[in-house]
Image: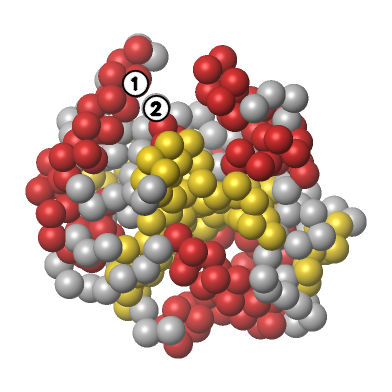
Amino acid sequence: MSEAPGGLVMRAAVIRAVRAFFEGAGYLEVDTPLRLPSLAPEPHIVPQASGAWFLQTSPELCMKRLLARGYPKIFQLCHCFRQAERGRKHLPEFTMLEWYRAASDCHDLMAETERLLGVVAGALGSGGELVYRGQRIALAPPWERLTVAEAFIRHAPVSVEEALARGDFDEVLVQHIEPRLGVGQPTFLYEYPAALGSLARLKPGDPGVAERFELYLAGVELANGFSELTDPAEQRRRFVADQEAIRSQGRDPGPLPEKFLDELTAMPEAAGMALGIDRLVMLFADATAIDQVVAFTPEQL
């Protein structure tokens, strides 16, 4: 077994603390299907087929349909599946925490995430910090908030506009920016370029950026959230563009999630967040790889 000493014990404690936080905040825990006839088309994610259907890459679309049906505060702990994702911080089957809140925006969820990790740290008796690979990360809020444009100016050899034009935004982000985020305290990287916020609302007054953010601790991307797009016509347009991008890669994007698009008209203004539980446990356990905090890796099955 590759498990770190106490890794599964810590994992159980983290999940208990997460559930206690959301139940105490008035959220309803939900359980949506893992196997779906259609997914949100995502050019950078390869889904796992299950017969003619797919295993979910995220519970996002089903959870938003529940928002549209009148459930204003929901959370879920579930397994998600993505092909071609295996490495020190990646598994093809992983555990995701997602939560959605009506009448909220991305800034509300940033503050809520600060409270969540504070509760988890308290449950683990970590003294309000974590130590990962020799780095001390103080969890007391407020955490650093850095726009993508500011991060490129501060850390990258090119501007965000140049990186987008050259088609190497992700490479520049991973190589030059991510290792410098979440040092000393967590960092929210926010206001992503509009083209990189497929399901996010554009910022009022500045349509060049999406109200999307990612959370980093010690250079590790932990979570992704945004103010939700609720315009079905705009969402359809973005999905069709993403389908074309997938076809250009030689892949079949599958059908559009029509039932989600139909129900989007009833969805309230809301914000949603996805956080990797395996990575969260890895950080608190000071593990060198995600393999050390799961019961089994794919290679052990």
Say whether residue 236 is visible.
Answer: yes
Element carrying mark 2: loop
Q: Nearer the viewer, residue 63 or 299?
A: 63
Q: Residue 276, how many percent across, how many down?
A: 54, 55
Which residue is at a point 17% across and 45% down the rendered structure image?
232
Q: Distance between the Cα atoms at labels 1 and 2?
A: 5 Å
The vertical placement of 216 against 109, above or below, is: above
Asked if marks 1 and 2 touch (Cβ < 8 Å), the reply is yes
Q: Nearer the viewer, residue 245 or 145?
A: 145
Residue furthest front as drawn: 205
Q: Which residue is mark 2?
A: 43
Q: Residues within 10 Å of mark 1 (few under 14, many from 20)?
A: many
Q: Residue 73, how many percent across, how many down?
A: 32, 74
- Residue 13 location, quadrant: bottom right
Q: Nearer the viewer, residue 112 or 64?
A: 112
- Residue 246: image tag: 1
- Residue 85: image tag: none
Q: How many marks?
A: 2
Which residue is at a point 26% across and 47% down the rendered structure image?
35
Say whether residue 200 is visible.
Answer: no
Q: Residue 112, how many percent across, how many down?
A: 52, 72
Ranked by sequence position, the earlier of labels 1 and 2 is: 2
- Residue 71 location, quadrant: bottom left
